Image (cartoon, rainbow, N blue to C red):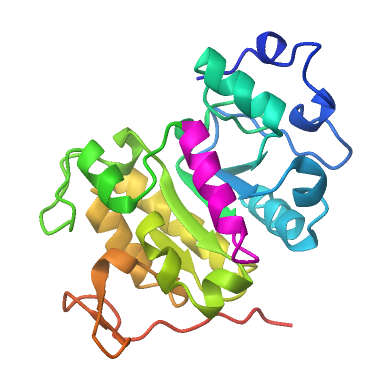
Amino acid sequence: MTIAIADILTKDIMTPARYLGNELGAVHKPWDSAKVRWVLTYPEIYEVGSSNLGHIILYNILNAQPRQLCDRAYLPARDLAAKLRETKTPLFAVENRRALTDFDILGFSLSYELGATNILEMLDLAGIPLTWRERNLAAGLPDNLSAKSINSPENSPFPLIFAGGQTATSNPEPYCDFFDFIALGDGEELLPEIGLVIEEGKAAGLSREELLLDLSQIPGVYVPQFYDMAEDGSVHPNRPDVPPRILRRVATP
C-alpha cells in the first residue's frame, strides 16, 4: 500500500520534511526488483533516529546488498501520529512511502529501555499486532508454532519483527514477547546473513516456522518462541533442532 503523502502532510503537520526521505544520503531502490525488502527503524522522532550512526551504517550496508532494499521509518511526532489514527492510515517508510506491513522484515534499534514503549507505539500505528503470539494467531498459526504454517513468508500478513542494539543484546528477555527474533551483537555482518536466508526462504516457499528455524541456525539470532525460561532464569530450547546457546556476534574490525 503506497501512502498518499500529500493527503497526510497537511499544513498543520510540523516539519513535514522529516517524513519525505529526500535528504542527502537517502537511498531509493526500485521496489519491484527487490527480492527482500527491509525497513529499519529507530524508535524516536526523525531528528534523533536519523543522527544515530549505527542505524545509518546498517541502512547503507543492507542497501549495498544485491537484490535487497532497505527503507527507514521513525516514530512520528504527536501531530502526525494523531493524523494517522484519524485517517486510519498505517505508519509508512520514508523512502518508498509504503506501509510497514508491505515489507518482509521490520527491524528496531533498541538502544535503551525506554525506547521499548516507542516500539509498541510504532507497531500499533502500523496495524501490526504487538506480540509474536498475536501475529501467529492472526496468520492462522498456533501460538507456539508447533505445526507448520500453510502460509509462505511472502504471503504472511505481517513482516518478521526483530530487534537489535545494546539493550536487546544485554538482556533480551523482557522484550521477547514482542519480537519474532532478536539479533544479538553487532549487525554489520549478521544482517546481510539474515537477508540471504530470507531470500532463499522466500524462493523456496518456506513456511514462517521453517524460515524462523533457518534463521535460528545463524550465530547471533535468538528466536524466543523456540526457547523457554526456567525458574532459575536460565533459557533452554523447547525443541531439539535449535542451538542450545546463542552466541553474541562481534563484527570483524
Q: In the shown orientation, is residue 218 left or right of residue 249?
A: left
Nearer to the camera, 142 or 200: 142
Give the farthest residue toward the right. 24
Task: Tell me if residue 130 comes above or below residue 87 in the rendering.
Answer: below
Q: Residue at x 24, y 57 (%)?
A: 210
Examine the image and state in which quarter residue 77 appears: top right
Comparing 32 with 219, the one in front is: 219
Answer whether residue 37 is visible to the viewer in this image: no
Residue under the point 78% across and 14% down: 12
**41 over 232 or under it: above or below:** above
Q: Along the horizontal axis of the image, is 13 left or right of 189?
A: right
- The picture places residue 51, in percent across and down from the top left corner, at 83, 53
Main SS of the magenta part reads: helix
Residue 136: x %, y % from top left: 24, 46
Magenta-colored span: 109-126
Residue at the spot 41% in from the left edge and 52% down from the top edge: 198
